[in-house]
């Protein structure tokens, strides 16, 4: 993930150099951009993994594949940006006895500022608040050819726990427009965004509608790196 962040910073610096030499032929206008995102999330789960390990459950990896989307509105005269994102990230790990599946769903609302706002190039920083629902499913391995009656009469083979919490979210985004309609200003948006988020509330665990006590806190700090593909509306 550190290499990914370094790559992000390198690409951003190249975007800035390109923007400084760009001839802006269109008047600045407000932009409303719908986008799709795909990337990686890097989150430590030391506290949760300790509980899993103590109970013989497959522990989680730090990295998860993520995808999602959202929209942002850039006000051309003030360079203020409103950003709204949703993301889904997931992973599956296994040991000889069971499989652990994790799925997270996040919603983020951020306010930012575009330090560079050209016809083809935008570079912005943002900060805001997010909310995450985390779902973990532990599945015990079942021998092949187990009968339905034996399966149903045996010990529970699946456990589900869910948690939710708020996060503070800070990051940056760089976008480039390879194609532009010179009459309307409509354009394709391609870019990258990277950031850091950290929990700012207690992690509340439950199973179905039952609250669970003494659950592990989610470790502070999550890095993410995402590719953005969008269009202006």
Image (cartoon, helix red, strand yellow):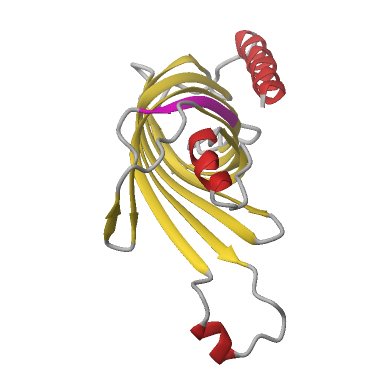
Q: Overall secondary structure of the magenta stretch?
A: strand
Please report the residue visible at 59 percent of the width from the left and 52 percent of the height from the top: 56
**Quadrant of the rendered structure where residue 22 is?**
top right
Looking at the picture, tell me which residue is in the foreground, 122 or 157: 157
Left or right of 96, for residue 164: left
State yes or no: residue 167 in magenta. no
**Quadrant of the rendered structure where residue 106 is?**
top left
Looking at the picture, tell me which residue is in the foreground, 48 or 88: 48
Does residue 214 show up?
Answer: yes
User: Residue 33 location in percent, x, y?
Assistant: 45, 39
Q: Is residue 124 above or below residue 190?
A: above
Q: Is residue 209 above or below residue 211?
A: below
Looking at the picture, tell me which residue is in the foreground, 194 or 176: 194
Q: Is residue 24 above or below residue 97?
A: above
Does residue 67 show up?
Answer: no
Please report the residue visible at 68 percent of the width from the left and 17 percent of the height from the top: 6
User: Residue 109 location in percent, x, y?
Assistant: 34, 34
User: Residue 26 location in percent, x, y?
Assistant: 50, 23
Split into 4 quadrants, where in the image is the N terminus?
Answer: top right
The magenta stretch is 192-199
């Amino acid at each position: 993930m550190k290499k990914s962040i370094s790559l992000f910073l390198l690409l951003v610096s190249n975007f800035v150099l390109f923007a400084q030499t760009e001839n802006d032929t269109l008047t600045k206008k407000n932009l409303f951009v719908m986008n799709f995102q795909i990337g990686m999330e890097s989150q430590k789960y030391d506290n949760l993994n300790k509980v899993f390990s103590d109970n013989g459950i497959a522990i989680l990896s730090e990295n998860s594949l993520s995808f999602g989307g959202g929209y942002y509105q850039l006000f051309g005269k003030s360079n203020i940006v409103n950003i709204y994102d949703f993301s889904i990230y997931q992973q599956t790990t296994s040991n000889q006895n069971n499989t652990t599946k994790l799925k997270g769903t996040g919603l983020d609302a951020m306010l930012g500022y575009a330090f560079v706002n050209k016809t083809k190039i935008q570079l912005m920083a943002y900060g805001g608040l997010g909310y995450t629902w985390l779902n973990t499913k532990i599945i015990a391995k079942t021998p092949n050819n187990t009968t339905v009656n034996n399966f149903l009469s045996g010990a529970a083979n699946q456990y589900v726990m869910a948690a939710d919490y708020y996060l503070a979210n800070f990051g940056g985004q760089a976008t480039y427009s390879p194609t532009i309609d010179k009459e309307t200003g409509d354009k394709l948006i391609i870019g990258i965004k990277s950031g850091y988020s950290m929990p700012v509330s207690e992690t509340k665990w439950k199973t179905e509608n039952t609250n669970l006590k003494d659950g592990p806190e989610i470790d502070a700090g999550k890095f993410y790196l995402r590719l953005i593909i969008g269009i202006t509306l």
